[in-house]
Image: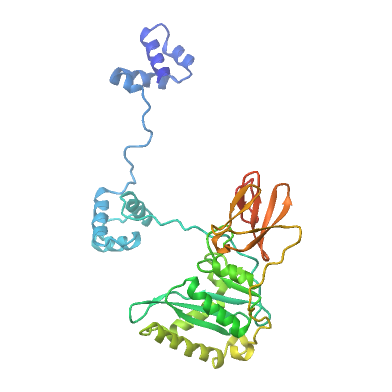
Amino acid sequence: MDERMRFVSACLENELSMTELCRQFGISRETGYKWLRRYETLGPEGLTERPRSPGTHPNATADSVLDALREIRAERPTYGPKKLLFLFRQRYPKVQAPAPSTVGAFLKREGLVVPRRRVRRVVGQHGTLSEPEQSNAGWATDFKGQFRLGDRKYCYPLTLQDSFSRFMLRCQALAQPTFELVRPVYEAAFREFGLPDAMRSDNGPPFASATFSGLTRLSAWWLTLGIRLERIRPGCPQENGRLERFHRTLKQETALPPRRSLRAQQRAFTAFTTEYNEHRPHEALGQKTPASVYTASGRSFPSKLPEPQYAGHWDLRRVDTNGQLMFGGYRLNISKALIGQRIALEEIADERWKLHFFKLTLGVFDKPTGMVTAPGYCRSCKRG
């Protein structure tokens, strides 16, 4: 602004030609005349920077079209861009409809849509997904999508399957997917069939959490029993495809329509599980039944939970009631799922330690920064 004022003042003094003045100020003659005309018309305000965006656009959507879309949206407040355009074309067949992306931008600009809540992703997989070659090498567990019963209460079906034989170990109707309700189901299965080598689940509760370790009270309990954790990738249910296929059959056979109460729904689950295990041939098993292929595990459920065995030179700390532990003058946030558990710290470099819980590496503690990060996290690029 000051530079333009000096240029205009020099022009008004008429001591130098326009060409010489423009050369001294490093601008073109066209720009020089433009600033002079603006000053003569608007005064000093004419020298301020003006917006470069055009006032109008030849491809802009007509106001009448936007008004029509606004009216339809008021009638159908839950409709998205594609459904709104369907109604718009029905009512105004001779008017060119805008693109769905244009309608979406219009709805967002008008504040007619609620932005999606950002979902906090959990830490990736624990271990690689194995292919079981015998019974109990791997079990798969999940919640089939909840549904309402005849009494309007929700049912959360918890399923547990041996991945090798497809034998259904449990199919339990629960009122809530909480740790207090699911642990007795797994404990009963462990007492009846023994322990598996690995447990495969998705990344949702109660199987996983959004902490850096990804542990919950349930998955931490599995680790204390010597069960390896296998987590499928977020958004990849096909990695637990055998159980997903069972869920589809389960819904067709027992939940269309749903039973009147949770107890009645459990009777339907139990009857179907018996039919599925003992009488229904399975193509992947050569038309054998899952019960004819499955054998119980040789690892029995312990009467007392074992203590973790760590290398003698590792530092041991116990997680306090806040889910934290003290080490090197720092209070490290670990996980409330591990309250009361012993954690081992293995020095892997100068002022860097790995944190272990049983056979799982929880993360890496970096003393200079005082941070605990997930395994594989890169400090230089700030990502895993």
The answer to whether residue 72 is left or right of residue 204 is left
Can you tell which quarter of the image residue 261 is in? Answer: bottom left
Residue 384 visible somewhere in the drawing: no
- Observer-nearest of 314 and 363: 314
The image quarter containing residue 92 is: bottom left
Colour style of the rendered protein structure: rainbow
x, y percent for residue 295? 65, 87
Q: Nearer the viewer, residue 151 or 79?
A: 151
User: Quadrant of the image for the C terminus?
Assistant: bottom right
Front-most of residues 340 and 32: 340
Q: Quadrant of residue 368?
A: top right
> Image check: 250 left or right of 293?
left
Q: Where does the image place residue 357, in percent across and percent down from the top left?
A: 65, 63
Could you say where residue 189 lies in the image, as x and y percent from the top left? 57, 82
Q: Would you place residue 228 above or below residue 16 in this image? A: below
Q: Position of residue 69 (x, y in %)?
A: 27, 56
